[in-house]
Image (spheres, rainbow, N blue to C red):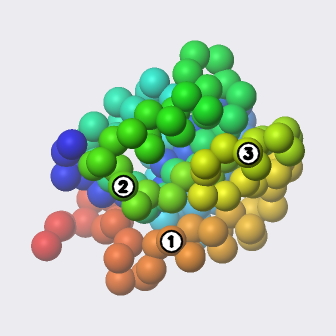
Amino acid sequence: MGDACWDVLIVEDDENLRGTMALCFERAGYRTLVASEGGEALRLLETGRPRVILCDLWMPGMGGREFLRLVRERSDLDGIPVFLMTHDERACQLEADGLLQKPMRVADLVALAARHCKAGDRAPPLGAPEH
């Protein structure tokens, strides 16, 4: 795995929702990366480690269930909380760290990031010199 660092990885196939979520996190001071499906997200995880992952359950390509299973199998990803986003209440049977019922409130998303990205532990802003 690479040594890049960011705060939130958003895995969501709905382009508008994905962009809105990224914008909300970035305005609140969090670095984000986005993927449109699980396979793309796994490739991003080869470049670095997020502080938290928000993943849609139902997506074309690799969905959230398979993505979660593969993340849990990788020891280098231990300790990264994965939250599933869905309308499906049956998702509570999965071994995610939490379930976010759609539609979600921006304030709830930012509060979630705040719980997992302590100010001193946040990734540096893009373009900032790394120490």
SS at mark 1 in the image: helix
Mark 1 → mark 3, Cα distance in angstroms: 23 Å
The residue depicted at 34 percent of the width and 66 percent of the height is 123
In the rendered image, which quarter is residue 114 located in?
Answer: bottom right
- Expressed as whole percent of the image width and height from the top left, the position of residue 12 reads 63, 35
SS at mark 2 in the image: loop
The residue depicted at 30 percent of the width and 48 percent of the height is 75
Marks 3 and 2, the one that precedes in the sequence: 2
Q: Which residue sits furthest top?
A: 61
Q: Is residue 46 above or below residue 83?
A: above
Q: Nearer the viewer, mark 2 or mark 1?
A: 2
Q: Nearer the viewer, residue 5 or 128?
A: 5
Q: Amino acid at mark 3?
A: Gln
Q: Nearer the viewer, mark 1 or mark 3?
A: 3
Residue 19 makes an appearance in the image: no
The residue depicted at 81 percent of the width and 61 percent of the height is 105
Q: Nearer the viewer, residue 120 or 62?
A: 62
Mark 3 → mark 2, Cα distance in angstroms: 20 Å
Task: State the residue position of label 3.
Answer: 93
Q: Quadrant of the C terminus?
A: bottom left
The residue depicted at 82 percent of the width and 51 percent of the height is 101
Crowding around mark 1 (Cα neighbors within 10 Å: few <14, some 14 to 19, many 20+) is some
Task: State the residue position of label 1.
Answer: 116
Residue 103 makes an appearance in the image: yes
SS at mark 3 in the image: helix
Q: Amino acid at mark 2?
A: Asp
- Expressed as whole percent of the image width and height from the top left, the position of residue 41 reads 45, 34
Q: Quadrant of the N terminus?
A: top left
Image mark for residue 78: 2
Crowding around mark 3 (Cα neighbors within 10 Å: few <14, some 14 to 19, many 20+) is few
Indicate left or right for 33 with 77 as reference.
right
